[in-house]
């Protein structure tokens, strides 16, 4: 039985708790920790965690001898410190996105994991969806041909008061705005499906969130070694939150939410629908059985299997770092106006949080700061 501690008991911790409870024959939540102890106690009561102990100090929670795995659901500024401590204490780690505030912090986490021999998985729950697994199967089959252009639209909507929470909307505590805390999912999916680009050109701004230093809109062009390109747009001003991934291949268009469209050229070059290619690609998509578990629960199952049997992690620490390298490249390009090449070197100002913070713009001054919201429910976007 794997003993679990959850650090931070805000809204996302409830989703972690439900994920672990789905495998109650394999794991048990034994510790909850929050700087506001009443929040930990409320979560224990809400989820009927009768055997759990509540802590205010994360080191006390992690150090318990019956804890094997630590879920970190804290603000990004606390990720590196708590993850490194847990790994050095011999615990496996599940880290909420984003992995850390900088590539330097990511590397400290990876070094601690390598020394301890323990697993680090970074939450990327959207990989663990049946439609996304099927889309990857289609891309990997090459039935749509070479991918020429991809578009990832990370469209979300948040009210002005979203940034009233004390750590949100600050470069120091949140590490950024919608690009790092919302489009991180789409960035991860692009890298999983297409790989790392050679370079990125980007723009960002704050369109409508006046209590935030950070961006609420960004758009980027990713260039790949094979000549293909991808676009990544992040937004917190899109009503409806219509999120999509679209891939234009040589033979067909495929996307999430699922749609396939194929064309062949008429004598004058105009398109005619290619139903045979559409049917062939759709058959590949439909051939994969639905996943038994999806989202956080599926990623938790993958991590439990890695702990128990050594199964390979679908999303490890290196994957989490790659996603942040792309995002920090976007921030560097948007800040400088230049095209940014990968990889980002260790002597680059955008490798460390301290030097990056001195360069990033403050779009607005943060003037409102609340300790907590009374509402604990959150949405994870539309699934199409």
Image (cartoon, rainbow, N blue to C red):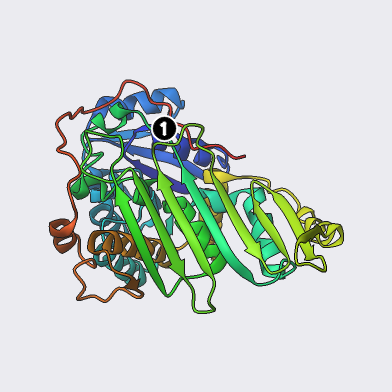
Residue 289 in the image: state x and y as whole percent: 76, 52
- The residue furthest bottom is 225
* Residue 310 or residue 321, whichever sits in front: 321
Q: Is residue 325 above or below residue 128?
A: below
Residue 222 in the image: state x and y as whole percent: 44, 66
Q: Residue at x 74, y 55 (%)?
A: 261
Do we see residue 123 in this rendering? no
Residue 39, quarter of the rendered image: top left
Q: Residue at x 44, y 38 (%)?
A: 156
- Report the side of 379 relative to 100 (left or right): right
* Residue 120 or residue 361, whichever sits in front: 361
Residue 214 in the image: state x and y as whole percent: 25, 45
* Residue 148 or residue 284, whichever sits in front: 148
- The residue furthest front is 268
Q: Is residue 367 above or below residue 95?
A: above
Q: Quadrant of the C terminus?
A: top right
Do we see residue 84 in this rendering? yes
Q: Is residue 33 above or below residue 71?
A: above
Element type at marker 1?
loop
Residue 349 in the image: state x and y as whole percent: 18, 68
Task: Please tell me how many numbered marks the rendered image carries.
Answer: 1
Q: Is residue 81 above or below residue 370?
A: below
Mark 1 neighbour class, 10 Å CA radius: few under 14, some 14 to 19, many 20 or more: few
Q: Which residue is mark 1?
A: 51
- The residue furthest top is 374
């Amino acid at each position: 039985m794997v003993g679990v501690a959850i650090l931070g008991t805000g809204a996302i911790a409830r989703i972690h708790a439900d994920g672990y409870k789905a495998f109650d024959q394999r794991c048990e939540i034994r510790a909850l920790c929050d700087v506001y102890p009443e929040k930990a106690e409320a979560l224990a009561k809400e989820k009927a965690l009768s055997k759990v102990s509540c802590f205010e100090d994360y080191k006390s929670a992690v150090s318990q001898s019956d804890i094997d795995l630590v879920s970190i659901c804290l603000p990004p500024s606390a990720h590196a410190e708590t993850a490194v401590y847990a790994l050095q204490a011999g615990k496996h780690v599940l880290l909420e996105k984003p992995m850390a505030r900088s590539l330097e912090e990511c590397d400290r986490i990876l070094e601690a994991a390598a020394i301890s021999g323990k697993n680090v998985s970074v939450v990327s729950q959207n990989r663990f969806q049946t439609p996304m697994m099927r889309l990857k199967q289609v891309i990997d089959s090459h039935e749509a041909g070479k991918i020429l252009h991809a578009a990832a639209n990370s469209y979300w909507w948040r009210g002005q008061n979203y940034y009233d929470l004390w750590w949100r909307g600050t470069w120091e505590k949140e590490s950024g705005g919608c690009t790092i805390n919302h489009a991180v999912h789409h960035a991860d999916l692009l890298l999983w499906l297409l790989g790392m680009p050679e370079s990125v050109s980007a723009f960002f701004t704050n369109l409508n969130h006046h209590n935030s230093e950070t961006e609420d809109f960004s758009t980027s062009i990713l260039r790949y070694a094979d000549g293909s390109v991808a676009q990544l747009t992040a937004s917190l001003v899109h009503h409806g939150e219509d999120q999509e991934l679209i891939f234009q291949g040589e033979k067909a268009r495929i996307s999430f939410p699922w749609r396939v469209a194929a064309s062949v050229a008429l004598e004058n070059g105009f398109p005619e629908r290619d139903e045979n290619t559409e049917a062939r690609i759709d058959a590949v998509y439909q051939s994969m059985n639905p996943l038994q578990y999806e989202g956080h629960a599926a990623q938790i199952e993958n991590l439990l299997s890695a702990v128990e049997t050594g199964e390979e992690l679908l999303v490890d620490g290196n994957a989490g770092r790659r996603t942040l390298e792309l995002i920090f490249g976007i921030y560097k390009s948007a800040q400088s106006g230049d095209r940014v090449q990968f990889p980002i070197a260790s002597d680059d100002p955008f490798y460390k949080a301290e030097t990056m913070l001195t360069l990033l713009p403050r779009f607005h001054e943060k003037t409102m700061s609340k300790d907590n919201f009374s509402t604990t429910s959150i949405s994870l976007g539309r699934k199409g």
